[in-house]
Every structure is written in C-alpha cells, then in structure tokens.
Image (cartoon, rainbow, N blue to C red):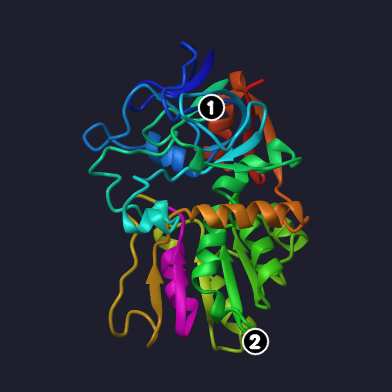
Amino acid sequence: MRALQYTAVGSEPVVVEIPTPAPGPGEILLKVIAAGLCHSDIFVMDQPEDSYGYGLPLTLGHEGVGTVAELGAGVSGISIGDAVAVYGPWGCGTCHACTLGRENYCTRAAELAIAPPGLGAPGSMAEYMIVDSVRHLVPIGDLDPVRAAPLTDAGLTPYHAVQRVLPLLGPGSTAVVVGVGGLGHVAIQILRAITATRIVAVDLDDERLALARSVGADDAVRSDAGAADAVRALTNGLGATVVFDFVGAQSTIDMAQQVVAIDGHISIVGIHAGAHAKVGFFLVPFGASVVTPYWGTRSELMEVVALAHDGKLDIHTETFGLDEGPTAYRRLREGTILGRGVVVPG
C-alpha cells in the first residue's frame, strides 16, 4: 500500500510503498477514505533531532475516517464495511481517566509507550491503517467522509475546550476565538450551536475573517497592534469572558492576557514551541484562569458526530490526493489552506 511518511528529521514527507498491515488480536484494519492535515503534524516535523521522539519512519495523520476492512481475532461490536471515525488520543483503557472515556488524559500512556496514530503510531495518511481497539472507533453513518475526518480533531479539540467552560458562556458573555483556521472555524460553529455567547473572531487574514462571519461570528477583528483595544471596545471595556487561542504563538497568548476579563478564562489550544503564558498576581486579571486542554474524550467525539448529523457543523475543506500530500503540507505551513486540508488516499 502507499503511505505518506516522515522519514528523516528536517525533511519533507514523502509517499512510499509499504506492506499492507494485518490486524492482530483485538485490532481492526481500516481502509482509509479521508485523513485530515493538522498543524500538530508541522509541530512534529519541526522538532530538532535531539528532542524528536515520534519514531521514524512515521506515517502521518491523526484525523482518520474509513471503512472496516478486516477484523482481528476477538473483535466484536463492529462489522466489515462499517463507516467509522478514529478516536485519536489512545490510552491504556484501564486507568481512572480511561475508564471515564477521557483517554486524552490517560495517566499511563507514556509509561506504556502508547502513542496516537500519526503521532507515534502509524497514522491515517495511507491506504490502510491499524486501529488498536474497537473502543477507538465511532460510527459516522452517512456523513461525508471528507467532512467527517476533521471532526476527530478539528471538531473534537474545540468542542472539549468549550465544554470545559460551558457554564461561563451564557447570555451576556463574550467568547474570543483567536485564529480562524482548521480548528477556529469549527470552534465558532460549536459556540453558536451550544452556547448563547457573543463570538468575536480574531485573525490576520481578511478571507478567514470573512469565513468567521459566514459560520457564525458576531464580530471579526484583525489581529494587529490594535486588536486588544478593539476587543476591549466591543466588550465595553470589560474584556472577554473566555479567550480560545487556536494559534498559541507568543503574540496571541500575550493578546489573550490583555483582553481576558476579571474572573475570565484563557484556553491555549494552539502549539508553538517556546510560547508560554506568564501567570501570577498582576500578570492576569484577578480570578482569571489559564489552561492547556488536550484533544477530547470518546463521548465528546460521539457528541461532535451527532452535531454534524444535525447539520450544525459545516467543515470547510480542501482535498488532496495522497501523492499531493507533500504539497498539502507545504500549503498548510504557508497558511494558504482555508479551513481544513484533507487527503483522500483513493
């Protein structure tokens, strides 16, 4: 089979021919229909050799949707041909967090060398992939696979971030979404679907700000030197109840700390090496909290899929063939993909 792999530190990914894997006991072989690109992949490929820890060669892709092609011994509860999405943050399945479905916060994954697909284990940028357990598959029914693949991260991650602070987002509140990319444009739709908050989108790009308005943002602010003042003005000087930073650069984290309200909340979702928040008295408003949520729970992925079935989520995608994968990652790095890039191996 063909796969898109990262083969050497500092190199671009390449399409290679590798053996089609066979499922072992408890495992499932998935025929991949669609696989999403993510800035986390760029983060992985930008790691220097002395800190890279994801294994080589690495088949990329942690957003995957496909059909069940083969079942390993002992697998039940799923059938050949079923259309499913892959829940990515694999855990041990037995610790307290995992038994609650919160495998994204598994306490033993590192100890047991359990890695997510595309972030240590072979991922979904291939014609086939192995899924380690039936509990990591969520049925998608008749959803479009291309639009469903990003639900597993670009949908699940913002949904989890919003759910953590849902009680704060009632009438009269303001949520600021920084970065209207693959995750940010979905976050706006999630906020519109399950909260009563006012939504302010912040981005550098006019096309993305237009996208933000089209999917439900009440206001759109250019991310420049005047952005913090503009957000403050929109909130009558009170600041934002919640800031969701889907960029995670030092400049956006600093802006989040400038605009968050007293007793507000900052959720740093985007990852940039070296960027950090400075927390302490007089560094953030009194009562404000700062968190770094990670991915989401299995039950939350089911809820995201349900929102998509109800027509509440319209994932903007640009598709690429597997051979176009290297070009797609270059486009992702350049910031020229509107919404989410999705590779279709077939």
Residue at image coords 39%, 60%: 250
Span highlighted in magenta in the image: 252-271
Quadrant housing residue 139? top right
Residue at image coords 74%, 42%: 143
C-alpha separation, residue under disc 1 versus residue under disc 2: 43 Å
The x and y percentages for residue 206 are: 69, 56
Which quadrant, please, contains the C terminus? Answer: top right
In the foreground, 301 or 12:
301
Label 1 environment density (alpha carbons within 10 Å; few <14, some 14–19, many ≥20): many
Residue at image coords 53%, 32%: 329
Give the side of residue 39 with respect to residue 331, left or right.
left
> Relative to 131, does residue 259 appear above or below in the rendering?
below
The residue singled out by tag 2 in the image is 172
Query: Which SS class for mark 1?
Result: loop
The x and y percentages for residue 1 are: 54, 12
In the foreground, 300 or 135:
135
Is residue 253 on the magenta stretch?
Answer: yes
Badge 2 amino acid: Gly
